[in-house]
Amino acid sequence: MDSLITAAARALAAGDPLGALKRVALRDDAPALALRGIAMAQLGDLIRAKALLQRAARAFGPKEPMARARCIVAEAEIALAGRDLSWAARALGAARTTLEAHGDFVNAVHARYLEVRRLLLIGRLDEAEGMLAELDPVLPAPRAVHELLLAGIAMRRLRTRPARAALARANSAARRARIPALTAEVESASRVLSMPAARLIARGAERFLLLEEVEGLLASKSLVVDACRHVVRQGRKAVSLAKRPVLFSLARALGEAWPGDVARDALVARAFRLKLADESHRARLRVELARLRTLLRTLAKVSATPRGFALVPHGAREVVVLARPVEEKHAGMLAFLADGESWSSSALALALGTSQRTVQRALDSLVAAAKVQSFGRGRTRRWMTPPVPGFATTLLLPGPLPID
């Protein structure tokens, strides 16, 4: 019977869940339950997989700590696949320590990669990169995962050359591993670099940019009003307006109109969302423009004109606006949901850095607009949406600015 467990484990390692189930589907001992759970996870039935792994962990008991630790790692992977980021990271760390103490370094490294994936999803890139620096896998499958994570960090930081190199190494390692799912994941990640990642608005015209072109634009001497990160920047100088939405609306309106100006009433309508403006609104506009002028003093001037106001850069020859490929009120949330996985509201709140109630209100409005669908009830309720066809969502996800 142990030979069946060994054969099933080898089938799972090779990405053949059906082959594993053929060997252990009718068994209810602890090792078979664990393998059945992993197989069901690979087949996409995450709820059944989680239940089987929990049964396996209870069946192993405290006398078999290494086997229980493996079940915890597998359960954490299932939670991550289901975008349930509220699972206990400490439990995964403890399981990894147990595996290292018992000499199971392969599964310990796998647990470490799960920790890195979680950090990458919530935008904690420095911590993820620090963990990756401690790892140097030799086997093809973990090497492919390692390079995929490096590519993910590089893309979040808009470093396309290191991202391409990491994806090439990941593709080579995935082919050596001969695991179809891993190869498909590498190919999916590679397609991001060939899809439009943003829109460039300049002198009344607009066009889509690839991630590589966005990187080049931000490294240029142009003054960029970045509507993806709500920042105004030139080279390594940047002024964040992420917490000043009115000021950013004014900066974007002035950037889109450059080298021309914007009428006062048009600025009032853009910043305050009013159709008609009176003298009090114009007075408030002057106050907000004075604040914007102070914040942008190292990058540009906000000059008054007979008709309204204009942006005058100090050293830049060009002023451009970098916008999202698709403008959407809840674009950040849709960017996460566009990965094709199902997310819990608590995971979205953690990833977006906001309250769960705010996320739930946004999800309700997206469901009403038929942009998001949900399934399940209570704590098992999940939301998902198909990805926006032909667009990369890299610039919508949380992460540090390229100048950091």
Image (tube, helix red, strand yellow):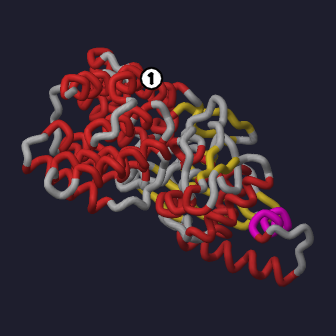
Which of these two is toward me, 140 or 331?
Answer: 140
Q: Position of residue 151 (x, y in %)?
A: 36, 35
Q: Is residue 234 above or below residue 113?
A: below
Kindly tell me whether residue 151 is visible in this rendering. no
Judged from this view, the residue extending furthest toward the right is 276
Kindly tell me whether residue 367 is visible in this rendering. yes
Q: Look at the image and tell me in which quarter the N terminus lies.
A: top left
Question: What residue is disc 1 on?
Answer: 184
Q: Position of residue 86 (x, y in %)?
A: 43, 61
Q: Is residue 27 left or right of residue 341?
A: left
Residue found at x 61% / y 64%: 359
Judged from this view, the residue extending furthest toward the bottom is 280
Which of these two is toward me, 322 or 112?
Answer: 112
Which of these two is toward me, 10 or 21?
Answer: 21
Mark 1 element type: helix
Residue found at x 78% / y 71%: 272
Magenta residues (range)? 264-271
Q: Is residue 115 left or right of residue 138?
A: right
Residue found at x 78% / y 63%: 270
Q: Position of residue 287 (x, y in %)?
A: 69, 80
Type of secondary structure dominating the magenta stretch: helix
Q: Look at the image and tell me in which quarter the C terminus lies.
A: bottom left
Q: Is residue 159 above or below residue 355?
A: above
Q: Is residue 379 magenta?
A: no
Which of these two is toward me, 152 or 107?
Answer: 107
Circle 1: is it few (<14), some (14-19), or many (20+) Cα within 10 Å? few
Q: How many marks are shown on the rendered structure?
A: 1
Residue found at x 66% / y 31%: 389
The three-letter code of the residue at mark 1 reads Ala
Q: Is residue 208 left or right of residue 343?
A: right
Q: Position of residue 172 (x, y in %)?
A: 30, 17
